[in-house]
Image: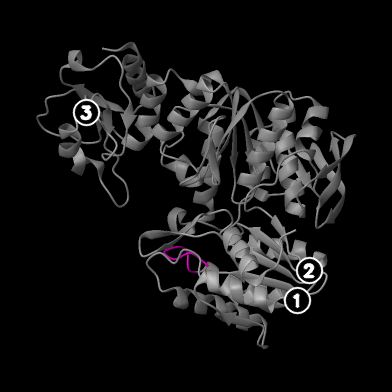
Amino acid sequence: MDQRVERGLADLKRAGLLTDIGGDWSKLPAECALKSDSRQVGPGDIFACVAGDHVDGHQFIGQALAAGVSCLLVQRPVGEVSIPWIQVKNVRAAMGFLAAALFDEPAEKMKMFAVTGTQGKSTTSYMIRSILQSCGIKTGLLGTIVYDDGNKAELADRTTPESDEVQLFLKRMVDNGCQACSMECSSHGIVQGRLSGCTFDGAVFTNLTPEHLDYHGTMDNYFAAKRELFRAYLKCGAAIAPNAKSEYGRRLAEEFPGAMTWALDAPARLTGTNVSLSSDGGEFDLSLDGRRIARVRIPLTGSYNVENALGAAAVCLAAGCDESKVVAGLENMPQVPGRMERIALENGVRVIIDYAHTADSLEALLSTLRPLARHRLVSLFGHGGDRFAGHRPLLGQAAAKKADRIFITMDNPRTEDPRAIAEQIAAGVKEVRADDCWSIDLPRDAAIFKALDWCEKGDLLVLSGKGPEPYLEINGVKHPYSDKGTVEAWARERGVRIL
């Protein structure tokens, strides 16, 4: 048996996942890869039969055998097969350990930084990468927006990929000379074991607000999922950076007394004070244990982006990064796609594209931009189908409190009727406002065209919910789409220059 496979089996046994093994292991090739997609397996591969919510990989064993796989990773007995097999309690959790062993433990060859929480994960992970690169550390990135292996960036399919994909990306980072990885860790990914095979040198907790309750059920369950990152996936002596302004962050800090707490407008070790915001960015005084480090200017506006900067700075400082390099990394970071992404139009209208898709994040976004609008604040958004419907009237209420004009549209309706979703949002608007400040406009590109036609000089148009996503998902089909591309198309058609 290959030594890497032996190591993977030993890791599975230590994790309490290994149930049994069988078959003729002499037939296993010296080089093999682990894959969980039956459409991508080929000769010599190990096929991991993931039992997902909608599809059970065990149903495709015959197809995998026909493709020439050399081994099966299964969750239940599969009868007589002519190749070796490994039975485990949970394939999704187990395949990360096995993939890590096959790729020679790439997470052990880099500094690994994790970011979890409801909001701010993407921006914080970008900030961590910028800080590390200012320290001369080439850094890969895995998250909601892109998977970047240090050589090539590709659009992300979801925040935390399957564990075999995670290990593949980490291996590519190592092969491309990366010395670190900044990684978003979703609650789904943590609970489903997609982080298996990873251990982290540092982890940030941003905040926790109601989201994904259709999956987790309660806020306590949601927090327990996040907390598992800190309990099960950190290396000895890892840097822990919880937000002390959050009740749940304080609970983490109590559990890990050595944590580098951080906060805006709350007691913590690392703090940001004297905040100044403009449409071009934010400034604040960065202080550690009461000692002022520097006046920091970041190219992102919004108090929540100051909080993201504090979280990134906290984990990097706790991990030993030089203070001046931390400041430089924050000040020189590039714009994050779809996170307060700014487009200035020649006609005096400004557009902000942002991923905010919960009531709390939308209200925070609009509250930040309200004083920056020279004329009117215009909000355009929708809500995803097949997701927690209770958010919809709350989104309408949030927009009605802050915006002068509201365009309600679609946002990945999936299998639901987009107009029905929009009407649920409108019900929330009507609870706050009695005027005709809103309209339902479908589809999304037509809504953006209408909103841009309506806007005048000095107006600030906020397109939220989609951020950098390159598609609209309707009835199981992902149609190519981009908020930014739609604004650019409008500008071309109307002859308006983008500045």
Disc 3 is placed on an element classified as loop
Q: Which residue is mark 1?
A: 456
Would residue 18 be found to the left or right of residue 325 on screen?
A: left
How packed mark 2 is, by other alpha carbons closer than 10 Å (few <14, some 14-19, many 20 or more), is: some
Q: Which mark is residue 348?
A: 2
The residue most toward the bottom is 435
The image shows residue 332, relative to residue 399, as above or below, that is: above
* Three-letter amino acid code at the position of disc 1: Glu
- In this view, the residue in front, 479 or 122, is 479
The answer to the question of whether label 1 and label 2 lie on touching residues, with beta carbons closer than 8 A, is yes
The image shows residue 333, relative to residue 366, as above or below, that is: above
* Three-letter amino acid code at the position of disc 2: Gly
The answer to the question of whether label 2 and label 3 lie on touching residues, with beta carbons closer than 8 A, is no
Q: Which residue is mark 3?
A: 69
The residue that appears at 65% across and 59% down in the rendered structure is 353
For marks 2 and 3, give the CA distance: 60 Å
Would residue 27 be found to the left or right of residue 290 on screen?
A: left
What kind of colouring is applied to the model shown? one colour
Q: Where is residue 432, by image quadrant?
A: bottom right
User: Which residues fall within the magenta stretch?
Assistant: 383-389
